[in-house]
Amino acid sequence: MTTGKRYVVPGIPDHLFDRGEVPLSKQEIRCLTLSKLRLKEGQAVLDVGAGSGGLTCEMALLMPGGHIYAVERDRKAAELVRANCEKFGAHNVTVLEESASGALTGRELPRELDRIVVGGSGGELEQIIGRGFELLVPGGIMVINCILLETLQEALQLLEKSGFKEIGFIQASIARSREMGGKRALQPLNPVFIISATRPEPARSWDSSQNN
Amino acid sequence: MTTGKRYVVPGIPDHLFDRGEVPLSKQEIRCLTLSKLRLKEGQAVLDVGAGSGGLTCEMALLMPGGHIYAVERDRKAAELVRANCEKFGAHNVTVLEESASGALTGRELPRELDRIVVGGSGGELEQIIGRGFELLVPGGIMVINCILLETLQEALQLLEKSGFKEIGFIQASIARSREMGGKRALQPLNPVFIISATRPEPARSWDSSQNN
Amino acid sequence: MTTGKRYVVPGIPDHLFDRGEVPLSKQEIRCLTLSKLRLKEGQAVLDVGAGSGGLTCEMALLMPGGHIYAVERDRKAAELVRANCEKFGAHNVTVLEESASGALTGRELPRELDRIVVGGSGGELEQIIGRGFELLVPGGIMVINCILLETLQEALQLLEKSGFKEIGFIQASIARSREMGGKRALQPLNPVFIISATRPEPARSWDSSQNN
Amino acid sequence: MTTGKRYVVPGIPDHLFDRGEVPLSKQEIRCLTLSKLRLKEGQAVLDVGAGSGGLTCEMALLMPGGHIYAVERDRKAAELVRANCEKFGAHNVTVLEESASGALTGRELPRELDRIVVGGSGGELEQIIGRGFELLVPGGIMVINCILLETLQEALQLLEKSGFKEIGFIQASIARSREMGGKRALQPLNPVFIISATRPEPARSWDSSQNN
């Protein structure tokens, strides 16, 4: 009997989320993003640009002993985050309805974060990465999703400059099967770049490959 | 402090597995596969064609209250599955060193399975899908990974014929960043088809999309 | 001075074609298709399922000494083929407004064809491939575009059964840059399978790899 | 009879080129590149970073009345360009065995170029784009292939700064069929970015999209 048991993997189907006009990261992209985030039970996670709350809900449900700080400055989107958290029963979420820079320098975040995931940077990538580095614990991971080539480039440069290590990314090109007259074609999703980087642990700073 | 906490998402880096010559599904493919499998705590899962044990280990660690039956007929591969389970501390795994058809009709599997994941079919796709349907609980999910176009086609036809519903697939084309002289190119992984299908619930057809 | 000189490569921009509701193969797909067709000056080419006439026009302009037989059973589409040929000044085209099977057994085709390109098969793939083999000169090439997995599979099987050799295909996944607020994202086109096969030259039948 | 007729489309199979250790652009990439170059009969084309001469040979054969200036500073590669031109009977080629910046400011290029194609920039992208703009006729087209994200970004910025218009790019992700035990898998080629841009025509800005 599996009824009532909770899921142990991400992958909530897209159509289960309330959405409106607000962007929702696709199921496959959420899964890849969270796998790169290497999320552990009990962590404090900052979710910047939460959109419809897709990643927020997935993380909150997978990590009932942790806490998600979901930053979303758009009022309608922030309401969707709350609505979707309610719908899925995710109670370990604090929605911060303000800009990323406001949240990162405000008093509502804990003094240390284990993970930061950036779904949308709202033109504040420099502050997010710079201040994010300070807030992350050593060994903490930042994952940034983007579709713009310029954002990819800028993020990679800022991550290096800020002291992050193990910087890498994937380009995820997913096509879904689509039925056409009983047969199947492929429907491509928009390709997404998923960048990941780690704040190095101080004790190891002398042994890793230095990039400057 | 996050030390000692367990991961709540799949995504063990490839290089942490013992491998030898045996195929290992790539990190990104494992994540997408498990997300389509919609794995829940406490489930009984059959893993057909376990290879190096990549999926086996991920599932066992994410679902400590569940059990994985890993079928792998190749002796060297079966030993790798055991070695990797040992390495990652995955104890809720039974390795069945035999063919898929042997395992599916033998006495070591439980009478009901919640999930079946097929990483390699060894030419026995028809038996795996046909017998798998019988062993799956209503609402149970089968996920099949393949790289051959012929296997994709055959699997889709067999899944339909056997009574599965919600049959679909994705093609995952992942490219990883690769450093070249301090700059970054894209290194494509082999594209993989990830098929998913559900054994329908006879009595619950009026109540779809329940999410807890 | 380059004015008035003709193009020596395919690649007419999509927006220059008259289109209506009729499908038009995308610029990049037309180029890849024609490159697999290995078109030579002066050839007789059958274009099955001409759609809006994209491939027809490209071939006619690149090969002024050759001739294109464009089969299109849909009246509106056939009119578009004619309109686009007129627009681009392609006069070496005969539009056959009938089914593929009708055209292949009718009296309007020459007794020998150098190339056959199939943009749409209208459910007549078996006849197109079977009869096409007979009409092709030894060394003649057939190229088939498809987006359905089932058509890919069926075409590959029929090509083998009919005696074609050097059967292969590519999957073309093209993404175009798209401006978003002065920055650039990627817009994926639908992935297309481009199959190519050659009618073997009799003198060589004893030396190539036989597939049955 | 088609024997002896010349090809009217690009697409020389990779294995027909002499190669050594020098990079050769893949058949599909050559075709897409040339289609974006919109090559016309009789043009003067600069080919920067000719590598093994893949693009050089294709262009020379498609455009017997034109001329290719193939710049390649590596001695071994330059020899391969010559060897491949010889092999394919391409005589309308001048190989410039020097750096791009040397060739662009030297006396061997004509005073006006119709097209510039960049297969490798050797760290001289700024000079190639800046000086290339000056050498191109109004309406002339530059196409740049790259695999590095940094080069893509830099090229886009330099093209805009230099006055180019109609700047765009595609990402070409091609997978080729690969036989495995009589069945077929997909083998991905490295994804390539193909950038194109036009030197605007000062007097013709009111008359765009003329096609002959």
Image (spheres, coloured by chain):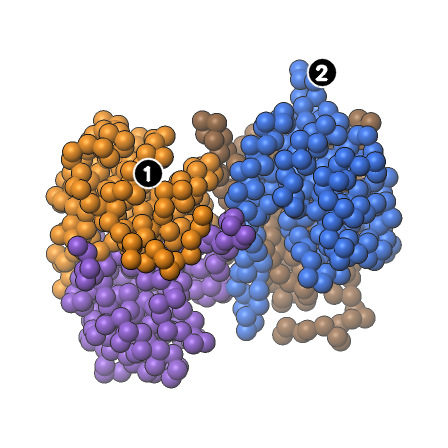
Chain colours: A orange, B purple, C brown, D blue
Looking at the image, residue C84 sits to the left or right of residue C21; the answer is right
Quadrant in which residue C85 is drawn: top right
Q: Secondary structure at mark 2?
A: loop
How far across and how far down the image is residue A134, in percent?
27, 42
Disc 2 marks which amino acid?
A: Ala
Query: Taking A123 as reference, is B102 above or below it?
Result: below
| Residue C87 at x, y percent in the picture | 71, 27
Instruction: Find the distance from the CA under tag 1 to the CA under tag 2.
Output: 48 Å
**Residue at 63% over, 32% down:** D197
Mark 1 highlights which residue? A130
Q: Disc 2: which chain?
A: D
Dot 1, how many residues are within 10 Å of its Cα: few (below 14), some (14-19), or many (20+)?
some
Q: Nearer the viewer, residue C45 or A127?
A: A127
Residue at the extreme front: A206
x and y percent of residue D149 in the render? 52, 44
**Which mark, residue D203?**
2
Near-viewer residue (D187 or B62): B62
Quadrant containing the N terminus of chain A in the rendered view: bottom left
Q: Amino acid at mark 1?
A: Gly
On the same chain, marks 1 and 2? The answer is no
Q: Which mark is residue D42?
A: none
Question: Image point 78% across, 71% down: which residue?
Answer: C204
Q: How many numbered marks does the figure carry?
A: 2
Is residue C75 visible in the rendered structure shown here?
A: no
Chain of the residue that carries numbered disc 1 in the rendered image: A
- Is the Cβ of the residue at disc 1 closer than 8 Å to that at disc 2? no
In this rendering, the answer to whether C145 lies above or below D154 is: below
Residue at point 60%, 50% (across, down): C145
| Residue A4 shown left or right of residue B163 in the figure | left
- Residue B61 in the image: x percent, y percent? 23, 66
Q: Nearer the viewer, residue C38 or D157?
A: D157
Who's the residue at 46% across and 66% down the image? Answer: B151
